Amino acid sequence: MVPRYHPTPLSGGDRKALAKELGKARAMTTILATQAADVRAKGEALIRQADKLLSESWNEKMWADGGPIDPSPTIDQALNGGYSWLQIECSRCKTKREVDLAALRHPPTTAVHDLASRLRCSKCAKAGRRPAATLLQLTPRPHQAAPET
């Protein structure tokens, strides 16, 4: 963008006044840009907190009611809220596993409850069956399996 042209006044007092006003305007842009960055950071933190609360609320509804609850957070909201793993269970063999939401090849606007019909058990797929997965909960990190001895 081309800087705005301010014609220089002929008198000395007017030139000094123009220079003073231009200096104030330049200082104000720095102040306003800093304030905008602060407000944006606060807003992003509030959105992150809202996404976390939405994911926790959905987990509680899933635990209380069972079944894929609609509406659910989107993949993007779950990731933004810190819940990047989805715990699922095969409806046939009852094998539990975690799915990394960031690694899924679905649009980030896909609701988590829509994944129930799309996720399949890999163990049952080897046996020639393709039962749908049952969604259990969103988790911030995968659960570690107990060490086998």
Image: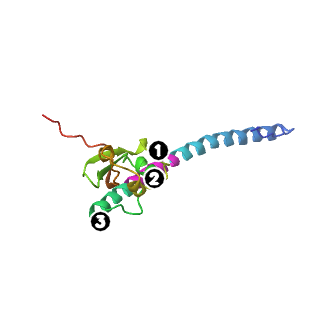
Q: Which mark is residue 96?
A: none
Query: Mark 1 or mark 2, which is nearer to you?
Result: 1
Whether the magenta-drawn stretch holds residue 27 is answered as: no
Q: Residue at x 29, y 52 (%)?
A: 90
Whether the magenta-drawn stretch holds residue 43 is answered as: yes
**Amino acid type of the residue tagged 3 in the rendering:** Asp
Would you call the spot at circle 1 few (<14 residues within 10 Å), some (14-19), or many (20 or more)?
Answer: few
Q: Residue furthest right?
A: 10
Residue 102 location, quadrant: top left
Image side of residue 13 versus residue 96, left or right: right
Q: Which mark is residue 47?
A: 2
Q: Residue furthest top?
A: 149
Q: Which residues are magenta?
A: 39-52
Would you call the spot at circle 3 few (<14 residues within 10 Å), some (14-19), or many (20 or more)?
Answer: few
90, above or below 30, in the image: below
Asked which secondary structure carries label 2, the reply is helix
Q: Which mark is residue 65?
A: 3
- From the top left corner, tell me how far across and down residue 78 is, in percent: 40, 50
- Mark nearer the N terminus (1 vs 2): 2
Q: Nearer the viewer, residue 95 or 57?
A: 95
Q: Residue at x 36, y 49 (%)?
A: 120
Q: Residue at x 64, y 40 (%)?
A: 27
Q: Residue furthest front?
A: 128
For disc 1, the marked residue is: 105
Mark 3 and mark 2 residues within 8 Å of each other at the beta carbon: no
Asked which secondary structure carries label 1, the reply is loop
- From the top left corner, tell me how far across and down residue 137 is, in percent: 31, 54
**Marks 3/1: CA–CA distance:** 28 Å
- Mark nearer the N terminus (3 vs 1): 3
Q: Nearer the viewer, residue 51 or 20?
A: 51
